[in-house]
Image: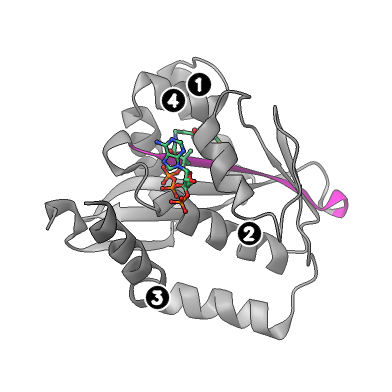
Amino acid sequence: MQNFLVDSLIRKLWITESDVYRDHLLRLDRDSRHSRFGGGVSDEFIRDYVGATYRLNAVVHGFFVNGELRGAAELRPLGPALTREAEAALSIETPWQSHGVGSELLDRTLLAARNRGIKKLHMACLANNRRMQELARKFTAELSFDFGSVVGEVAAARPTPLSVLREIVADGHGFATAVLDVQSRMFRAA
Ligand SMILES: CC(C)(COP(=O)(O)OP(=O)(O)OC[C@H]1O[C@@H](n2cnc3c(N)ncnc32)[C@H](O)[C@@H]1OP(=O)(O)O)[C@@H](O)C(=O)NCCC(=O)NCCS
């Protein structure tokens, strides 16, 4: 059993946790940072970026291992509220990549987008980012996209009582539901 499985959970970040998010993004290695931001960016850029994330009321889901944020998915509103567009971006630190964490985080993000009436979801994804493209492909029922930059139409854009309930349940029981699934996938991958 891998030690990092102990005490892992997926939950939304609190408004007070901007430092936690910033430190996670600063820890990304060079390639992951490049993929996450669509190019090389400085530490200063990341600090400013996280400031904007919190000013814009973004929803950030985090993947925590032993209390440390190791992965995140950000849903950031774009333009005026009426346009109902948002940007989604994922970041998983290298040792935790390819264990199903990105899939769980994108699932949570799509649910949050749906419950906020988002109709169009932009994912800044470099054309050579195969893993992100594979990940997006798994959600073709909810997203249509073209490569280069992934622009997804969230299929069922209107929230339903069930989709709202799913988000509430995920918030309350994230550890018991999504993470157990992540862990079982991790066991298979180990
Ligand atoms: C891209 C990223 C978010 C994917 O998250 P992840 O947790 O590594 O991905 P998952 O394990 O959920 O895998 C998703 C799918 O990608 C594919 N995949 C996984 N590992 C792969 C690899 N090494 N090479 C190619 N495809 C791969 C698989 O199809 C997988 O689905 P499956 O396990 O059901 O077969 C993550 O790797 C990451 O943060 N990378 C750096 C930053 C980045 O690229 N962000 C995206 C910009 S928005």
Instruction: Identify the residue under disc 2.
Output: 110
**Mark 4 crowd level (few <14, some 14–19, many ≥20, 10 Å Cα):** many
> Which stretch did the figure color magenta?
82-93
Type of residue at label 4? Answer: Arg
Q: Secondary structure at mark 3?
A: helix
**Mark 1 crowd level (few <14, some 14–19, many ≥20, 10 Å Cα):** few
**Callouts 1 and 4 close, C-beta under 8 Å:** no
**Mark in front: 1 vs 2:** 2
Q: Secondary structure at mark 2?
A: helix
- The residue positioned 66% from the left and 84% from the top of the image is 162
The quarter of the rendered structure image containing the N terminus is bottom left
- The residue positioned 87% from the left and 49% from the top of the image is 83
Q: Secondary structure at mark 1?
A: helix
Residues at marks 2 and 4, CA–CA distance in whole angstroms: 22 Å
**Mark in front: 1 vs 4:** 4
Instruction: Identify the residue under disc 4.
Output: 33
**Mark 2 crowd level (few <14, some 14–19, many ≥20, 10 Å Cα):** many
**Callouts 2 and 3 close, C-beta under 8 Å:** no
Residues at marks 4 and 3, CA–CA distance in whole angstroms: 29 Å
* Label located before the other in sequence (1 or 3): 1
Residue 177 - label: 3
Residues at marks 1 and 4, CA–CA distance in whole angstroms: 11 Å
Type of residue at label 2? Answer: Leu
Residue projecting furthest to the front: 188
**Callouts 1 and 2 close, C-beta under 8 Å:** no
Q: Is residue 4 magenta?
A: no
Residue 54 on image: x %, y %:
55, 45
